[in-house]
Image (tube, rainbow, N blue to C red):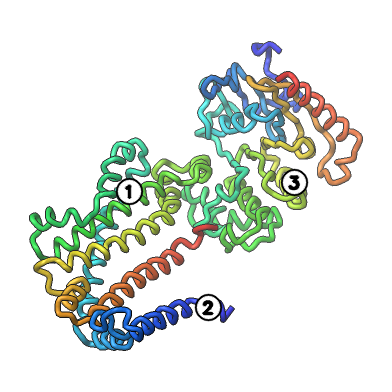
């Protein structure tokens, strides 16, 4: 059992070894690929009181706002559409179309409307995430087990009670799938947005800035920080899901 | 049989006014006529098993009586009342999908009482009384998915019984359980019936089970479904393993099988 738990470390060690080898045999220009310890030193220094920590926080903040706004709008709307299949069928094409539209293509439009500040970055991310959440919530509600709905009905539950007591809870696992996909997408959009003109902070800005200055250790550090943020957000949602949707898959 | 003829006299056989009266029931699925001018009387306080060929509409019949499936026509009354004024309990075949996995077993059982807006103390008391009544030895603080299949179905049955229903419906309740658990659950159900004498309608695809539990076995024909036969089964209760080899039981089961096979061959 203990040995099994150590397996993921093998991959990490292998990655570092390959990186060292690449530096050692000069596979890539040393300016472009510094040795791993330099990148890690930049990561630790940057996160512990340096600029990188601040950028990390700013990106986290924007992503959190984006996902919160998306959830507040998309979850109730998804429930309404899911509970009313005709309404969903009517909206389905529009939802699918914009869900398939790269949210980054909406930047110029949002820039014109909301200016170059935080608002645009957050709202474009919300837009992308909301459609993913909406789609998943609606399907979660629509795919509620028929038997469970009938069981509530035969016990005398009104339509409203069936919705609140059964459909809502039935859709929770799918809602969490939507939230996790949504937060990943929101992070992608926020980081891209931070690379745009007019940005002054955030992980996207840090990666871009370091690259412009040819400060490669710092660029790698910012990339790893972004990865850690994405991984951490996903993990956080999974832990919350495990707590609130203890019955999923059982 | 002329469908206009008087409804089968189960009630007369039971010697009392019928509890459930079905008159002129009609149901079709697309082109298929499942029920047409179907009449039936079900006596009060009796256990009726429904048995018939595959797809003849056994489940559809109890689902229409229980209001889960709308009928195309006809009238169903419970001692003269409509379904809306009647307390019923319903046990589904698929307990895994019928229970609420987000609620502990005890909260599952209390759910219909919560719908009836009973205060918490009263709900608890009712469940405790039911548990004592049935001699159930399950940890009801567990979630359904932490229980065995038989225990889950027992929780389902308790959820149906806790409202003290006038009619209890069971749709193939034990078909997802293994044989050992099925035998145990049959006796649990029999004990419940002995205790409560609730009018009970069981749909079963297992003839032995249908006969073993019933006061009356209702045999349906292929569709459009008619009453092929209505067989009285009056061996004394409680019935046990010896009942299964009792000559009367064997004879009644044999008769039911004959009727069933005759109906199947007609198709």
Q: Residue B179: give x, y in percent of width and height.
A: 76, 49
Front in this rendered view, residue A109 or A179: A109
Q: Is residue B49 above or below residue A142?
A: above
Q: Residue A90: give x, y in percent of width and height.
A: 30, 36
- The mark found on residue A5 in the picture is 2
Q: Are marks 3 and 2 on the same chain?
A: no
Callout 2 secondary element: helix
Does label 2 or label 1 sit earlier along the sequence? Answer: 2
Q: Are marks 3 and 1 on the same chain?
A: no
Q: Are marks 2 and 1 on the same chain?
A: yes
Task: Answer yes or no: is residue B122 visible.
Answer: no
Q: Residue at x 28, y 80 (%)?
A: A33
Crowd tier of the residue under label 2, counting other residues whose Cα lies within 10 Å: few below 14, some 14–19, many 20 or above: few
Callout 3 secondary element: helix
Q: Residue A130: give x, y in percent of width and height.
A: 27, 54
Front in this rendered view, residue A241 or A225: A225
Crowd tier of the residue under label 3, counting other residues whose Cα lies within 10 Å: few below 14, some 14–19, many 20 or above: some
Q: Residue at x 32, y 88 (%)?
A: A37
Which chain does the residue under circle 1 lie in?
Answer: A
Q: CA distance from mark 2 to mark 1?
A: 39 Å
Quarter containing the C terminus of chain B: top right
- Which residue is the site of mark 3? B186
- The mark found on residue A89 in the picture is none
Task: Answer yes or no: is residue A131 visible.
Answer: yes
With A45 as the anchor, is B92 left or right in this view? right
Q: CA distance from mark 3 to mark 1?
A: 44 Å
With B19 as the anchor, is B191 left or right in this view? right
- Tell which tag, 3 or 1, sits nearer the viewer: 1
Q: Residue B54: give x, y in percent of width and height.
A: 67, 30
- The mark found on residue A78 in the picture is 1
- Tell which tag, 3 or 2, sits nearer the viewer: 2
């Amino acid at each position: 059992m203990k040995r099994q738990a150590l397996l993921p470390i093998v991959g990490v060690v292998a990655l570092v070894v390959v990186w060292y080898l690449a530096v050692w045999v000069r596979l890539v220009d040393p300016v472009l690929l510094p040795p791993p310890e330099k990148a890690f030193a930049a990561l630790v220094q940057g996160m512990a009181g340096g600029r990188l920590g601040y950028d990390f926080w700013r990106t986290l903040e924007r992503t959190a706002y984006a996902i919160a706004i998306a959830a507040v709008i998309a979850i109730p709307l998804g429930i309404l559409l899911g509970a009313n299949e005709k309404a969903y069928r009517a909206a389905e094409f529009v939802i699918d179309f914009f869900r398939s539209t790269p949210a980054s293509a909406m930047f110029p439009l949002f820039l014109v409307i909301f200016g170059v500040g935080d608002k645009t970055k957050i709202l474009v991310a919300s837009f992308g995430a909301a459609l993913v959440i909406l789609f998943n919530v609606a399907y979660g509600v629509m795919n509620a087990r028929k038997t469970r709905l009938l069981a509530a009905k035969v016990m005398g539950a009104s339509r409203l009670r069936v919705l609140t007591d059964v459909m809502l809870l039935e859709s929770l696992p799918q809602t969490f799938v939507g939230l996790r996909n949504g937060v990943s997408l929101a992070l992608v959009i926020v980081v891209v947005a931070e690379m745009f003109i007019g940005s002054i902070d955030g992980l996207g800005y840090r990666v871009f800035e370091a690259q412009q200055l040819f400060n490669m250790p710092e660029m790698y550090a910012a990339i790893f920080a972004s990865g850690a943020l994405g991984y951490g957000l996903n993990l956080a949602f999974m832990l919350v899901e495990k707590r609130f949707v203890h019955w999923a898959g059982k | 049989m002329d469908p206009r003829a008087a409804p089968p006299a189960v009630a007369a056989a039971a010697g009392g006014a019928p509890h459930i009266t079905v008159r002129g029931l009609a149901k079709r699925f697309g082109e298929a006529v499942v029920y047409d001018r179907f009449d039936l009387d079900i006596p009060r306080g009796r256990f009726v098993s429904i048995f018939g060929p595959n797809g003849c509409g056994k489940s559809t019949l109890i689902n229409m009586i229980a209001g889960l499936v709308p009928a195309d026509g006809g009238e169903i009354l419970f001692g003269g009342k409509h379904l809306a004024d009647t307390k019923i309990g319903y046990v589904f075949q698929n307990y895994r999908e019928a229970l609420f996995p987000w609620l502990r077993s005890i909260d599952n059982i209390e759910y219909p009482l919560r719908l009836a807006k009973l205060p918490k103390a009263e709900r608890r008391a009712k469940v405790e009384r039911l548990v004592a009544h049935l001699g159930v030895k399950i940890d009801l603080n567990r979630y359904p998915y932490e229980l065995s299949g038989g225990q889950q179905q027992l929780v389902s049955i308790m959820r149906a019984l806790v409202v003290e229903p006038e009619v209890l419906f069971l749709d193939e309740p034990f078909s997802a359980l293994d044989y050992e658990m099925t035998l145990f659950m049959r006796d649990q159900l029999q004990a419940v019936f002995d205790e409560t004498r609730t009018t009970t309608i069981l749909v079963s695809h297992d003839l032995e089970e249908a006969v073993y539990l019933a006061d009356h076995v209702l045999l349906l024909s292929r569709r459009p479904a008619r009453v092929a036969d209505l067989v009285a089964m009056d061996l004394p209760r409680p019935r046990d393993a010896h009942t299964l080899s009792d000559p009367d039981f064997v004879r009644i089961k044999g008769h039911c099988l004959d009727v069933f096979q005759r109906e199947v061959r007609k198709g």
